[in-house]
Amino acid sequence: MARSAAQSQIFNVAVVGQAGRLGYEALIFAASLRHTTPDFKGRLLVMEPQAGPLWNKDPGLQDPEIRRALTELGAEIIPFHSKHFGSAYPYGNKIEMLGAMPKAEPFVFFDTDTLITANLLEVPFDFERPTASLKREGTWPIPQLYGPGYTGLWKSLYDKFGLDFASSLDLNQPDEYWRRYLYFNAGFFYYKCPHAFGEKFLEYALAIRDTPPVELCAQSFDPWLDQVALPLVIHALNGSRDALPDGMLDGTHSCHYRFLPLLYACESDLAVNILETVTAPNKLKKVLKGSNAIKRMVYQNRGAKVRALFDQDNLPRKEQAIRNRIKKNGFWMR
């Protein structure tokens, strides 16, 4: 069987690890990568924001047991400094951390609340053509009653950065329907160089935040700023919405679960099995029990009770309805 492009090259994988929930999630992510992709030869980088004037409190990994467990799984904890975002916009971590990663080395970034559920080396990454997660809803922009519509709002951004707007459109989707316009979830993205990607990501995000086009005067950028800038970055770097086969990332090979109750309610049996398998070893269990949500959901079987509330083949259409049912039964945790 021929080796895929991804299998024939080495790339790095990065997540953000910091105090609180994200530290525990980084540990589960690392365990899932090692379990499903034992022949991974790249570097696993846990990017750690450092204390500084833009943070209300130290955002770093405070628990030495989490640091030790990550290191034992082969992760490297890499510090980076927040110069533009910090507590005011913590999603900016995924922008600012790129400059602290190894230059000119292909990378894949994942949100920390992700499981790798099959061998990552089977995914045919083309690091010349970036893309990002299509597991998203039409959260931004919100066209106002008296305009402009989606076309006017998005075109104002492409024009601001000198990008060709027309070539970004999915002409299979109707005009003024949000899916016609390039839009991603920032749950994963990749490219051949984190510095090149990060410089453009930072340039676009700061310009949108500080000097947005007048057409966007009624739009909110919090928490959407990273997802507003991301499609512009990908388009500028010759990427596209169809650079990966459908159904691998956010499908057979990864699961962006966001919160454990949602994982148990909505995700595949494979994702649940991977989660419970990689968290089972006593060495990890001792550390992960420091998270009340993991202790209750995984080790005290609250997750199984959440799963029993739903038919995974016939879920409520709106996520809010799923959350409300979990909360009504007293099982919501984050």
Image (spheres, rainbow, N blue to C red):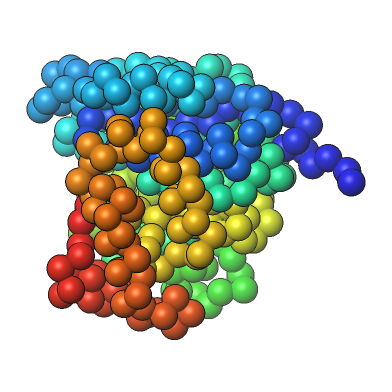
- The residue positioned farthest toward the right in the image shown: 1
User: Residue 1: percent from the left, percent from the top?
Assistant: 89, 46
Relative vertical location of residue 258 with respect to residue 6 in this rendering, above or below: below
**Image point 45% across, 64% down: which residue?**
267
Does the rendering let one see residue 99?
Answer: no
Frontmost residue, 310 versus 16:
310
Frontmost residue, 311 versus 209:
311
Relative vertical location of residue 159 with respect to residue 15 in this rendering, above or below: below
User: Residue 74: percent from the left, percent from the top?
Assistant: 51, 22
User: Residue 79: percent from the left, percent from the top?
Assistant: 35, 16
14 left or right, relative to 209: right
**Image point 32% across, 26% down: which residue?**
66
Relative vertical location of residue 66 with respect to residue 316 in this rendering, above or below: above
Which image quarter: residue 323?
Answer: bottom left
**Image point 26% across, 40% down: which residue?**
289
Relative vertical location of residue 290 with respect to residue 240 in this rendering, above or below: above
**Image point 53% across, 46% down: which residue?**
116
325 left or right, relative to 199: left
